[in-house]
Amino acid sequence: MTMTQDAREQLIAAARSLFFRGLTHGSTGNISVRIENGILITPTGSSLGTVTADELSLIDVNGRHIGGGRPSKEAFFHAAVLRARPSDEAVVHTHSTYSAALSCLDGLDPDNALPPLTAYFAMRVGRLALLPYHAPGDTALEPVIERAAHDHQALLLANHGPVVSAPSIAAALDTLEELEHTAQLHLLLTGHRTRPLTDEQVAALRR
């Protein structure tokens, strides 16, 4: 099996995992992975529950379509994140329920939209940047997301959903799931006094 074939199979396995565990629905969400000659990404209008390896799109580092199916209209921001984070190899974007709900709340800190309620959030996600609302497919988001991705592996698109990157597809899924779980905790705790980790506790975990 070639490295590209392996990347395709890993991407499809991740897509199925997200879909069948309810982290995506319908034709929402997209996944990308860096390969030797570009970036593989799920095609436009595809369901992560049914998309096949043969249908995947290939784009270049600037988001231009160079092979396979027509890419997601959000391919440009996958490329932007991977340009900003050369050590990361995969990007996952979903409309997962609790993270999407969080993205609709007023008064979030744009530099740290979700407090570090648990050690695992602090270790796997870090600081969650909230980016201003852009309509799906609006390329004006590209410079915004590329700038934010330099300092954050997890981003929250306002009134939309999360975008996470990591050195592997498996690690990106872990980060996405930790973010979704912590968003759920945050919403469950709304109206209650919480005790987030201190800056010193977070720093110790991320050394």
Image: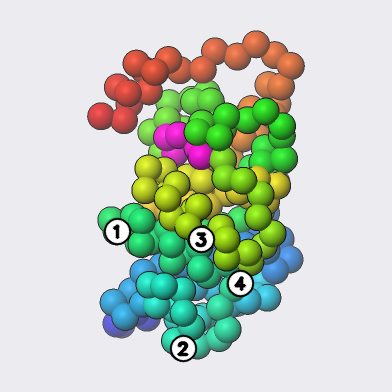
Q: Quadrant of residue 195?
A: top right
Residue underneath mark 4: 73
Residue 142, label in figure: 3
| Location of mark 2 (residue) | 67
**Disc 1 target residue:** 86
In this rendering, would 165 be left or right of 51?
left
Quarter of the picture holding the C terminus: top left
Identify which amino acid the numbered label 2 is placed on.
Gly
Mark 3 to mark 1 CA distance (whole Å): 16 Å
Element assignment for label 4:
loop
The residues tagged by marks 4 and 3 sit, at their Cα atoms, a distance apart of 12 Å
Which callout, 3 or 2, points at the residue further toward the start of the chain?
2
Q: Amino acid at mark 4?
A: Lys
The magenta stretch is 125-129
Tag 1: residue type?
Pro
Q: In whole angstroms, how far apart are the C-alphas of marks 4 and 2?
A: 15 Å
| Label 2 to label 1: alpha-carbon separation | 22 Å
Mark 4 or 3, nearer chain start: 4
Q: Please name whichever residue, 48 or 161, is drawn nearer the observer in this view of the structure.
A: 161
Q: Where does the image place residue 155, in percent across and percent down from the top left?
A: 51, 46
CA gap, disc 3 to disc 2?
21 Å
Q: Nearer the viewer, residue 122 or 60?
A: 60
Amino acid, disc 3: Glu
